[in-house]
Image: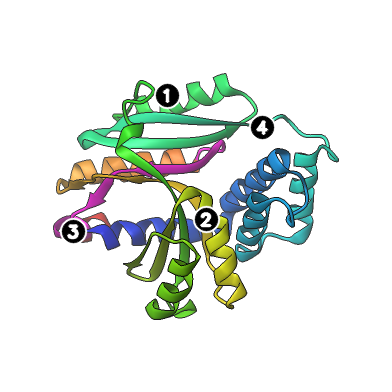
Amino acid sequence: MAGHNKWSKIKRTKAVIDAKRGNAFSKLAKELTLAAKAGGGSPDTNARLRSAIAAAKAANVPNDNIDRAIKKGTGELASAALEEVLYEAYAPGGVAMMIEIVTDNRNRSANDVRVLLSKNSGTFADSGSVAYMFQRRGEIRLDKPAATEDQLMEIALDAGADDIVDDGDDWIVYTPTDKLFQVASQLRDKGITSRSQKLIYQPQTTVTITDVATAKTLIKLYDLLDDYDDTQNVHANFEIDDSIADQLD
């Protein structure tokens, strides 16, 4: 789809900025805590925790921070009770959004997200009215130099991956939800380290944005939602047309 790489580059640049200011550390710490709470504090027996630790180390999260987050999940350290919530929303241009939230106060988060949407031409959607447009999948991202396409085809597909996509500066390996940790582990065993691995909501159809004003509004809304303290991930089904890409810089 036209403009896909442009939007990917925008998101990747944002991820680098987030990492520098600590936003990414907070999200990774919450995932460590949730993983330990759900499956225990041993990565040997907890695949989700093993994946969370790998992602945290790839982002250079200090070991002390990792240990502390895990202990909060197992109850060894006191912490607020975290809850995972999924919100569905509509954005300008007929765009659909899935917003993953981790919060210790569901009412506060719902109100905060509602305000962000309403002030930026978005609205909450009824449960199920957006979700059907997305597919739950595993996503593994690797820097291009990490492996060749042939290497990925041989290792990842044999381990259970669905597809491998060239996304500009990245390789993306898509997996069934129950194969994410298995595929990532097989890649690591072969010396191929991913930059990130997580479950995503992948849009089944996309809306290509060709209007500059709409594109700017969408990106602003996406950034505000993604920057919100309780947000873990934002998934949206829009792409930016190449014809307006230069006007967004």
Of the two numbered discs 3 and 2 on the same chain, state the one appearing first in sequence. 3
Q: How many marks?
A: 4
Q: In what element is the residue under mark 3?
A: loop
Spatial separation of the CA atoms under disc 3 and disc 2: 28 Å
Mark 3 Cα-neighbour bin, 10 Å: few <14, some 14–19, many ≥20? some
Whether pointer 4 and pointer 1 mark residues with C-beta atoms closer than 8 Å, the reply is no
Spatial separation of the CA atoms under disc 2 and disc 4: 24 Å
Quadrant location of the C terminus in the rendered image? bottom left
Residue 221 locus on image (x, y percent): 36, 39
Residue bearing the label numbered 2: 180
Of the two numbered discs 1 and 3 on the same chain, state the one appearing first in sequence. 3
Residue bearing the label numbered 4: 82
Q: Amino acid at mark 4?
A: Leu
Residue 47 falls inside the magenta stretch:
no
Task: Say which quarter of the image contains residue 204.
Answer: top left
Mark sitting on residue 114: 1
Left or right? Give the position of 201 relative to 197: left
Q: Nearer the viewer, mark 1 or mark 3?
A: 3
| Residue 203 against residue 6 in the figure, above or below | above
Q: Nearer the viewer, mark 4 or mark 1?
A: 4
Q: Amino acid at mark 1?
A: Arg
Residue 189 locus on image (x, y percent): 61, 73
Residue 109 locus on image (x, y percent): 54, 26
Q: In the rendered structure, which segment of residues is drawn in magenta? A: 228-245
